[in-house]
Image (cartoon, grey):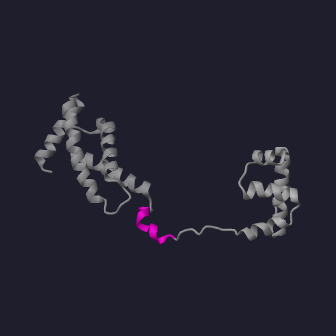
Amino acid sequence: MTGKDEAELSRLMRAAIAGDERAYADFLRRTAALVRGFIRRKIVQGGVDPEDVVQETLLAIHVKRHTWRQDLPVLPWVYAIARFKLIDAFRRRGRRIEIEIDEIAETFAEPEAETVSGRDINRALDGLPPAQRSVVSSVSVEGRSIGETAAKFGISETAVRVSLHRGLAAIAKRFGAKQFKRE
């Protein structure tokens, strides 16, 4: 940026402060290009979007334009705002490093599906009384709802819930799982 460019931007900013909308639009367009180059040179590693910093800088310039002293050059004022907005962006990012999931997806192992054989299910249900076995099998194995199971066996939904709870508790006790105790 030459002294002539500085003088032109200062002139545009003075006109903008005086109310010239066209001069203000021209000032912001030229300033955005300068700030964009400045920010891109400062960001060497990902995690901060240069365009976000440019937009935040332009917004700060707009909000604080009345603080610029018209007897001083405008570019040092603009670059100071840009520098502070860049620092804010780095602080927000912190010490995190952002990596696209696609870059590391192949390093994750596929989760193994947990399977239970029919023999294991029959073994778990064997120790239950026939009525409980039917209810637990209907809800937990066949996937029927409480209402469907109640209709199937001609009993109330409350009776299905009680039978299911007692059956699952018996299976858990039989296989060594600790039950939750009420306090």
Residue 180 in view (yes/no): no
The magenta span reads 99-108
* Residue 103 magenta-highlighted: yes
50 and 129: which is toward the camera: 129
Query: Is 65 rendered above or below residue 107?
Result: above
Residue 69 quadrant: top left
Name the residue located 26 percent from the left edge and 59 percent from the top edge: 41
Q: Is residue 111 left or right of residue 11?
A: right
Query: Is 50 rendered above or below residue 14?
Result: below
Name the residue located 85 percent from the left edge and 57 percent from the top edge: 132
96 and 177: which is toward the camera: 177
Q: Main secondary structure of the magenta part?
A: helix
Q: Is residue 153 left or right of residue 108?
A: right
* Residue 138 magenta-highlighted: no
Q: Position of residue 83 (x, y in %)?
A: 31, 52
Q: Position of residue 169 (x, y in %)?
A: 83, 60
